[in-house]
C-alpha cells in the first residue's frame, strides 16, 4: 500500500511541477518584459484548465503526503532491523595500542 501511494505521490509531484511551469505569470515576475495587465481589484477572468488541474493535483499531492507520513509513523519496521547480519559480524574489533607516557619537553633555554 505504501509503495502504491509513493508512486501516486511521485506522479502527482511531477505533474504539479509541469503544470506550474506551463502557466502564465500574473505578477510581473523576474522574466516578464512588460507590465502586468491584471489590476489589483479588477476581474481576473475565467479559470483556465491548467489552474483547475493544478488545484486538483495539489490536493492529491497534499493527501498522499499526509497519508504517507501517517503510514510511515505507524510502521514498526526499521532500516536497521532489515540490515543483513553478515555486515554486523564482518566488522573486526579495533585493538588499541598501549599508551606511553609523554616525555617532558627538553630545556632549550638556559638560565643566565
Image (cartoon, grey):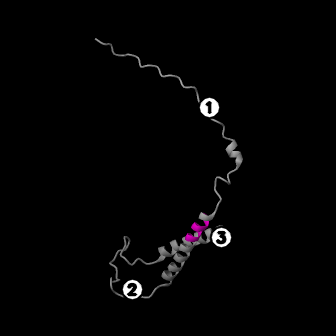
Q: Which mark's residue is nearer the viewer, 1 or 3? A: 1
Distance between the alpha carbons at the discs numbered 3 and 2: 38 Å
Of 97 and 26, nearer the camera is 97
Question: Which of marks 1 and 2 precedes in the sequence?
Answer: 2
Magenta stretch: helix, strand or loop mostly: helix
- Residue 69 magenta-highlighted: yes
Distance between the alpha carbons at the discs numbered 1 and 3: 48 Å
| Few, some or many residues within 10 Å of mark 1 (<14, 14–19, 20+) | few
Query: Is the C terminus in the top left, top right, bottom left or bottom right quadrant?
Result: top left
- On screen, 82 above or below 74? above
| Few, some or many residues within 10 Å of mark 3 (<14, 14–19, 20+) | few
Residue at x-position 66% and y-position 40%: 91
Residue at x-position 46% and y-position 86%: 47
Q: Position of residue 55 (x, y in %)?
A: 50, 79
Query: Is the N terminus in the top left, top right, bottom left or bottom right quadrant?
Result: bottom right
Q: Position of residue 78 (x, y in %)?
A: 64, 56
The secondary element bearing badge 1 is classed as loop
Tell me if 94 is positioned left or right of 111 in this view: right
Q: Which residue is mark 1?
A: 95
**Badges 1 and 3: C-beta atoms under 8 Å apart?**
no
Residue at x-position 44% and y-position 88%: 46
Give the residues in magenta. Answer: 65-72
Q: Which residue is mark 2?
A: 44
Amino acid at each position: 500500500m505504501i509503495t502504491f501511494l509513493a508512486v501516486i505521490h511521485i506522479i502527482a509531484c511531477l505533474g504539479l511541477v509541469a503544470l506550474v511551469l506551463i502557466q502564465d505569470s500574473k505578477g510581473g515576475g523576474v522574466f516578464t518584459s512588460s507590465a502586468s495587465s491584471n489590476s489589483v481589484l479588477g476581474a481576473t477572468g475565467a479559470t483556465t484548465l491548467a489552474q483547475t488541474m493544478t488545484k486538483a493535483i495539489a490536493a492529491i499531492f497534499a493527501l498522499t503526503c499526509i497519508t504517507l507520513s501517517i503510514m510511515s509513523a505507524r510502521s514498526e519496521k526499521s532500516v536497521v532491523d532489515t540490515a543483513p547480519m553478515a555486515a554486523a559480524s564482518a566488522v573486526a574489533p579495533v585493538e588499541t595500542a598501549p599508551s606511553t607516557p609523554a616525555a617532558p619537553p627538553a630545556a632549550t633555554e638556559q638560565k643566565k
